[in-house]
Image (cartoon, rainbow, N blue to C red):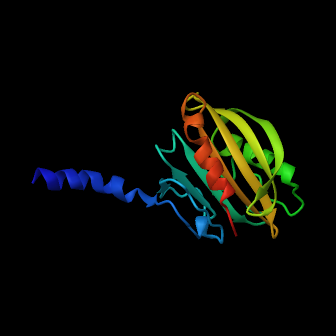
């Protein structure tokens, strides 16, 4: 009887995410985007938008990868929580790849009440075999004041935005799994 009660308590946790095993994984964020992780990840059931998907190893407060896939012109990166009060910036057909980090920053400031966010570095990169950008950033949210570091890879492919970002607390967790994220980002294909 105690075992059944314990399972009943755990069942929401078990249903809260899906294990992503090493090897090819397709249809990321309901798109043609695919990746080949080299380690296990947990895909969260949290829905930040139709074209987003979140993976984590230790929980999204400690490390998370967010995929933004096939986001077309006139669309925000994620579902708008307060569309009238704090509308999100939209992807544009006239965007340059150097505009991608600024789009992420503007989105975070509106959506997540980020007090401090800065783009620390940018450089050209290949994303799923296309010209893109690799960037580093740091941020602090008002709700927890934890200093976080992040990295992103993004590109405009066929008029749509594709981006993968990794975030974790600057203390310990960022360095712990950033190599796994970089390997994951290097494996992206369309």
User: Residue shown at 56%/41% (left/top)?
Assistant: 177
Query: In the image, residue 91 lies at what x, y percent?
Result: 79, 59
Q: Where is residue 169, by image quadrant?
A: top right
Q: Is residue 189 visible?
A: yes
| Res 167 → quadrant | top right
Q: Would you say 8 lies left or right of 71 here?
A: left
Residue 71: x and y in percent read 72, 64
Image point (28%, 52%), residue name: 10
Which image quarter is the N terminus in? bottom left
Q: Position of residue 154 (x, y in %)?
A: 75, 54
Q: Looking at the image, how many numbered discs can be counted on the residues?
A: 0
Q: In this orientation, does residue 77 appear?
A: no
Name the outermost residue toward the left: 1
Whether residue 4 is situated above or below residue 72 in the rendered picture: above
Q: Is residue 113 depicted above or below 38 in this figure?
A: above
- Asked if 184 appears above or below 33 in the picture, the reply is above
**Foreground: 186 or 174?**
186
Task: Decide if residue 167 is on the left or right side of residue 156.
Answer: left
| Residue ID at (58%, 69%) | 26
Q: Image check: 156 left or right of 12?
A: right
Residue drawn at x 51%, y 40% is 61
Q: Is the C terminus in the top left, top right, bottom left or bottom right quadrant?
A: bottom right
Of 157 and 48, nearer the camera is: 157
Residue 14 on image: x %, y %: 34, 56
């Amino acid at each position: 009887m105690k075992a059944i009660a314990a399972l009943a308590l755990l069942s929401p946790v078990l249903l809260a995410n899906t294990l992503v095993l090493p090897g090819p994984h397709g249809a990321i964020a309901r798109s043609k985007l695919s990746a080949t992780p080299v380690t296990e990840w947990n895909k969260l059931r949290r829905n930040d938008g139709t074209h987003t998907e979140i993976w984590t190893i230790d929980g999204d407060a400690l490390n998370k990868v967010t995929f933004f896939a096939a986001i077309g012109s006139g669309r925000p990166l994620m579902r708008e929580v307060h569309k009238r009060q704090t509308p999100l910036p939209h992807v544009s057909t006239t965007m340059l790849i150097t505009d991608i980090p600024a789009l992420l920053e503007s989105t975070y400031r509106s959506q997540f009440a980020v007090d401090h966010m800065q783009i620390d570095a940018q450089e050209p990169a290949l994303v799923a075999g296309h010209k893109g950008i690799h960037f580093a950033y740091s941020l602090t949210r008002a709700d927890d004041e934890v200093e976080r570091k992040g990295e992103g890879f993004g590109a405009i492919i066929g008029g749509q935005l594709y981006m993968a970002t990794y975030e974790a607390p600057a203390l310990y967790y960022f360095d712990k799994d950033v190599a796994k994220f970089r390997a994951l980002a290097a494996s992206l294909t369309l």
